[in-house]
Image (cartoon, rainbow, N blue to C red):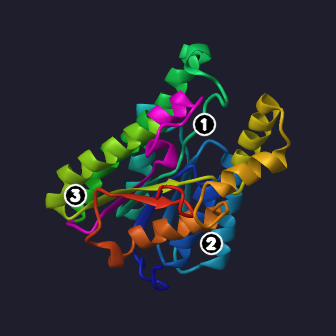
């Protein structure tokens, strides 16, 4: 875990910051002293979150930018607004993403849906990286990029081909960027959550239960039994791992996948 105020005067961008993991990540960054740019498409939720952070952590500031991370023009404008406000960027957390169809064999997977999940999870990670990198380099070292991959990008994931392919791609993107940016003292890593408590997992479990003719409780128990610790992870566990990766303590960790999976991938 990072030390309180270890990120004082740092500037962090978090995509998908209105809810779930992104909301917790941005709160941790604010707690640790960073100015936070909250990026997403739900302006009302982002504004409410920004007000909460500014009240709770008044020694730093928040900026809300509504942005579709798959639209390059919007991403360019978003980065410009962040740099204009805070005079630079030190940290980028790419949290925006989606699941695509659930419980769908490859032969039944809609081609447009496949394109859409790749667009959101891969292009929506690449574009913020592409346009933030020059500003990270300009800071003169110590920059951080953290992407959200997933355990579905560590092993094959039956009946989720679009989502799984997108997370394998995020892992490849992360490693390539780590190699390119290492000479600039910028680290690039990804976090791989396993089944995580929250609304998204509730939806996946409900769909699996319906498709398989089982109860949600049975599906939950089956997921949990596949982990060494016999449980799901919480969104706060994922956010805590990201807090570590952007902290000074992680300065020599780059190009790696950090599973937060309760011992699933062992």
Q: Name the residue under label 1.
A: 99
Say which label, 1 or 3, has the lower sequence index. Answer: 1
Say which label, 3 or 2, has the lower sequence index. Answer: 2
Residue 221 falls in which quadrant of the image? Answer: bottom right
What distance separates the C-alpha of mark 3 from that of mark 2? 28 Å
Taking the image as shown, residue 6 lies to the left or right of residue 232, namely left
Are the residues tagged 1 and 2 within 8 Å (C-beta)? no
Q: How crowded is mark 1: few (under 14 residues within 10 Å), some or many (20 or more)?
A: some
- Name the element at disc 2: helix
Say which label, 1 or 2, has the lower sequence index. Answer: 2
What distance separates the C-alpha of mark 1 from that of mark 3? 32 Å
> Residue shown at 67%/51% (left/top)?
223
Range of magenta residues: 140-165
Q: Residues within 10 Å of mark 3 (few under 14, many from 20)?
A: some
The residue lying toward the viewer, choosing from 241 and 40, is: 241
Q: Is residue 210 magenta?
A: no
Residue 251 seen in render: yes
The residue lying toward the viewer, choosing from 15 and 102, is: 102
Taking the image as shown, residue 51 lies to the left or right of residue 228, namely right
Q: Residue furthest bottom?
A: 4
Q: Name the residue under label 3.
A: 137
Residue 61 seen in render: no
Q: Give the mark toward the camera: 1 or 2.
A: 1
- Name the element at disc 1: loop
> Residue shown at 20%/65% (left/top)?
185
What distance separates the C-alpha of mark 1 from that of mark 2? 31 Å
Q: Mark 2 points at which residue?
A: 54
């Amino acid at each position: 875990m990072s030390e309180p105020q270890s990120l004082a005067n740092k500037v962090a961008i978090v995509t998908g910051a209105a809810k779930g993991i992104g909301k917790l990540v941005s709160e941790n960054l604010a707690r640790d002293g960073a100015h936070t740019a909250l990026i997403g498409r739900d302006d009302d939720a982002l504004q409410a979150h920004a007000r909460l952070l500014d009240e709770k952590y008044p020694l730093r500031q928040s900026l809300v930018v509504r942005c579709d991370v798959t639209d390059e023009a919007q991403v360019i404008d978003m980065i410009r607004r962040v740099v204009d406000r805070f005079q630079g960027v030190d940290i980028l957390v790419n949290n925006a993403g989606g699941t695509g169809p659930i419980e769908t064999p490859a032969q039944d997977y809609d081609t447009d849906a496949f394109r859409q999940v790749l667009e959101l999870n891969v292009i929506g990670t690449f574009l913020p990286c592409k346009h933030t990198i020059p500003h990270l380099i300009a800071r003169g070292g110590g920059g951080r990029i953290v992407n959200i991959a997933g355990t579905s990008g560590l092993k094959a994931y039956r009946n989720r081909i679009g989502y799984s392919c997108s997370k394998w791609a995020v892992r490849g993107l992360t490693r390539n960027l780590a190699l390119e940016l290492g000479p600039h003292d910028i680290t690039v890593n990804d976090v791989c959550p396993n089944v995580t408590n929250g609304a998204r997992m509730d939806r996946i479990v409900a769909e699996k239960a319906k498709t398989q003719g089982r109860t949600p409780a049975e599906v939950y128990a089956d997921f949990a039994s596949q982990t060494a610790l016999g449980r799901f992870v919480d969104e706060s566990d994922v956010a805590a791992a990201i807090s570590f990766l952007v902290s000074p303590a992680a300065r020599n960790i780059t190009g790696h996948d950090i599973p937060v999976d309760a011992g699933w991938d062992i």
